[in-house]
Amino acid sequence: MQSNYSMISKTKGSIQSDIFSGITVALALVPEAVAFAFVAGISPIVGLYGAFMMCLITAVLGGRPGMISGATGAMAVVMVHLVQEGNAMGTDISHSGVQYLFITLLLVGVFQSLAGVLRLGKFIRMVPRSVMMGFVNGLAIVIFLSQLNMFQSNGVWMQGKPLWTMAGLVALTMGMLFLIPKIHKKAPAALIAIISVSFLVLFTSVDTETVLSFIRANGGIGIEAGLPTFAFPKVPLNWETLIFITPYALILSAIGLIESLMTLTLIDELTDSHGHGNRECVAQGIANFTNGLFGGMGGCAMIGQSIINITSGGRGRLSGITAAFALLFFILFTASYIETIPIAALVGVMFLVVIKTFAWSTFNIINKIPKWDVAVILIVTVLTVKYDLAIAVLCGVVISAVIFAWENALRIRARKIVDERGIKHYQIYGPLFFASTTLFMTKFDVKNDPQEVIIDFEESRIMDQSAIDTINKLAESYHRLGKNVHLRHLSQDCIRLIKKAEKICDVNVLEDPDYFVSIDNYRKYRESL
């Protein structure tokens, strides 16, 4: 997957690059925040406030400099149900759905911060490469499909001249994004392209969709507003409210952390650097908690805006801080100018993000990797597009784990040797765990084995309770026939597992004094030899 991003610079960046990339990201955040606010069924100002606070707090406190957070579609699709049910629970302003959203964000913040404090961010390492590739492919498709909605006017698909105008401006923007870096590598290509296309539309009076027309088409007025103010959510503080919001808080927390940690891992690869997942969990939690107190929508890391940032040269925390304050500046002072930006210019930037996000190397390796990995990539991609990221990643990890367990279950083998004393040795190879116990039992010939049997685990490991129970059953089978079974070469963690279970087996301490579980029958065993 690495080769897919060869055109992304691996440099450390600079203050100038961080500032320019931050401004570019802020411009791209406006329609995204507005669109996702409409998806959630809330005011666009709430979405813009949420993007500002998420971006600022995670930029300052987060574990991945250069990563951008804001209002996201993955969380918006859950919020819409929360807001609808919240509206149904009351008729006055104190019981409105958006207020329930704010109180839920407080709980989301607590859950996410606890995940960081408890160092649960490390579990992102359990996500296999195939799941990661499916994730980026699915997300690229989701971003692409979300931009197609921009080719609608008042809910109707564009046709004729408006469509060709829109497509032409998108193509012009993308052409500039490819050309400008070839002329000057450090030039803020995205920012230059957006400004240039905006001036072209303004001075030639081209009739096309703008940020303002997009907002109005979706029932909004504009993006101009004041500073976000503190206000504790106006909902009843009782058990009914807690029971109602807790499931939503858990779902939103999981979606936010999974998307943020997956994006963090991707940005790590793109920049050849290392972020801190647990710190990012805490920062995401603080940001969502703050949104709940100051009337923001909340959110998580945004892969599209993050790639815009690093593609434009943003590497440090300054890029995210600049993006946040630039967005606030737009809201407070320059709303009328930002509202004149053609949607086509922003769509062109996002289409380039799609190209750089999609793991094109998937097509090169599809015949070179195991078929199960190909299946996982496809499944995660489809689930990401059809449902959401959290479901896709969880299903991908579960499927990968099942495949891993099945493949390892088939690796259990036993080499059988009878020594000069007539003692039969079973040398076990492969891990012994719940999936391999059935095959393990077939390796023994209890009825025809001699009086003394030694099971050697030097090349194997006892992994879980199922393995202990299997050894217990095997030993009982030998004991019923008056035969003795002994375990050898158990690692220390295996010994601890066995010691916690019923002590049913002896170990040949004469030949293997460093590995034994029980010496209850040691003297009896020596005398029998």
Image (cartoon, helix red, strand yellow):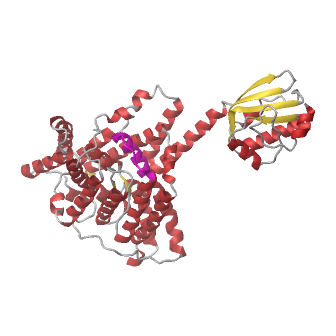
The span shown in magenta is 260-277
> Which quadrant of the view contains residue 171?
top left
> Residue 236 versus residue 302: which sits nearer the camera?
302
234 relative to 144 in the view: left or right: right
Q: Residue 131 location in percent, x, y?
A: 47, 40
- Give the answer, above or below, for where 249 lies relative to 494: below
505 relative to 295 in the view: left or right: right
> Residue 521 versus residue 69: which sits nearer the camera?
521
Q: Is residue 200 magenta?
A: no
Q: Residue 364 location in percent, x, y?
A: 40, 27
466 relative to 136 in the view: left or right: right
Residue beneath the point at 59% across and 36% down: 404
**Residue furthest out toward the top:** 420
**In which quadrant is the C terminus drawn?**
top right
- Give the answer, above or below, for where 430 lies relative to 215: above
Residue beneath the point at 44% across and 76% down: 235
- Give the answer, above or below, for where 41 lies relative to 167: below
**In which quadrant is the N terminus drawn?**
top left
Q: Residue 208 location in percent, x, y?
A: 17, 51
> Which quadrant of the view contains residue 382?
top left
